Amino acid sequence: MPRPDRIIADASKKNWVDLHAPEGLQPYLKLSRIDRPIGTWLLLFPCLWSISLAASKASLPDFWLFALFAAGALVMRGAGCTLNDIADRNFDGKVERTKKRPIPSGQVSLIQAFLWLGFQCFIGLLVLLQFNMFAILLGAASLILLAIYPFAKRFTYWPQFFLGLAFNYGALLGWAAVEGSISIAPVILYLGGIAWTLGYDTIYAHQDKEDDILIGVKSTALKFGATTKFWLVGFYSITLIALLVSGYLTSLTAPFYTVMAGAAVHLAWQIKSLDIDDADLCLILFKSNKVFGAIVLIGIVAGKFALPF
């Protein structure tokens, strides 16, 4: 049975880490947010979108690249979260949602956290080395973004923008892994992904706004406040336009646009349903972006094929 005193607030009470992982390994898996996999999905989907956009007409995407990027997303999201917890170690103990994280709760020392960070980065490097040289160099540059984000909330109300830069980098890297170069389509996809992150992570940040005020850190949730829905309309509109333009530039067929109508409905549902003062609902809507990512992926893959009539 999982120990209630160690289940982190925004993790499922029945997550597999608390239920099945060896007790000694649990704190490290929690540093990497393995008990909360939604972040890995949100990091992975822009990669999969880009790989699929770069596939040849009437062809399925390269599923070996899918597997490599899935492994890379898992370990690099874990590395980013570990770095974030190291940077926030003096804040997390003061916030109800984060006080049971491994470092503030004393389950992992600072030195152990740094060693775990290094191990994850090493695995990420092994994955990166499977790609072409252009993709390797492009991927190495992403470490700058990985290092900046954990500190952004100390100096700007827009840390979600820096998260978007890091979390959607796969829109560039996925294309580079296929083509060995970059074109305008993945750049537009990247911009759309940044807007997507600004939307969903603003929703997520509304869970912590009261604690953020008390400890003195910033977020778009605090900046937008009651106007959040207005901003979400803008961010999600940019996301949809960027996805449509990327699809047009890569000659996707009618099924893509049909499926994207469903993606638009999903984002509209998020905005309509949002109550910024309901933390549980904010978490549900945030997690629902996994559905949006899957819808877009299905649309892109379908759009590589012409209708049979």
Image (spheres, rainbow, N blue to C red):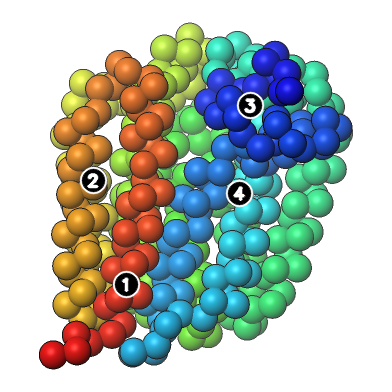
Q: Which dot, 3 or 4, sits closer to the camera?
A: 4
- Mark 3 vs mark 2, CA separation in Å: 31 Å
Badge number at residue 88:
3
Q: Secondary structure at mark 4?
A: helix
Q: CA distance from mark 1 to mark 2?
A: 17 Å
Q: Position of residue 287 (x, y in %)?
A: 41, 39
Q: Are marks 3 and 2 in contact (CB under 8 Å)?
A: no
Q: Is residue 258 visible?
A: yes
Q: Quadrant of the C terminus?
A: bottom left
Whichever of labels 3 and 4 marks the residue nearer the N terminus, that label is 4
| Residue 64 in which image quadrant | bottom right
Q: Quadrant of residue 113?
A: top right
Q: 18 or 1: nearer the eye?
A: 1
Q: State the residue lying farthest toward the left.
A: 309
Label 2: few (<14), some (14–19) or many (≥20) C-alpha neighbours in 10 Å: many
- Residue at 54 percent across and 76 percent down: it is 63
Three-letter residue code for mark 4: Arg
Q: Which mark is residue 300?
A: 1
Seen from the viewer's position, the closer of residues 144 and 200 is 200
Q: Which residue is under mark 2?
A: 267
Q: Amino acid at mark 1?
A: Ile
Residue located beneath label 4 in the image: 77
Q: How many residues crowd mark 3 within 10 Å: few (<14), some (14–19), many (20+)?
A: some
Q: Which badge, 1 or 3, is on the more N-terminal residue?
A: 3
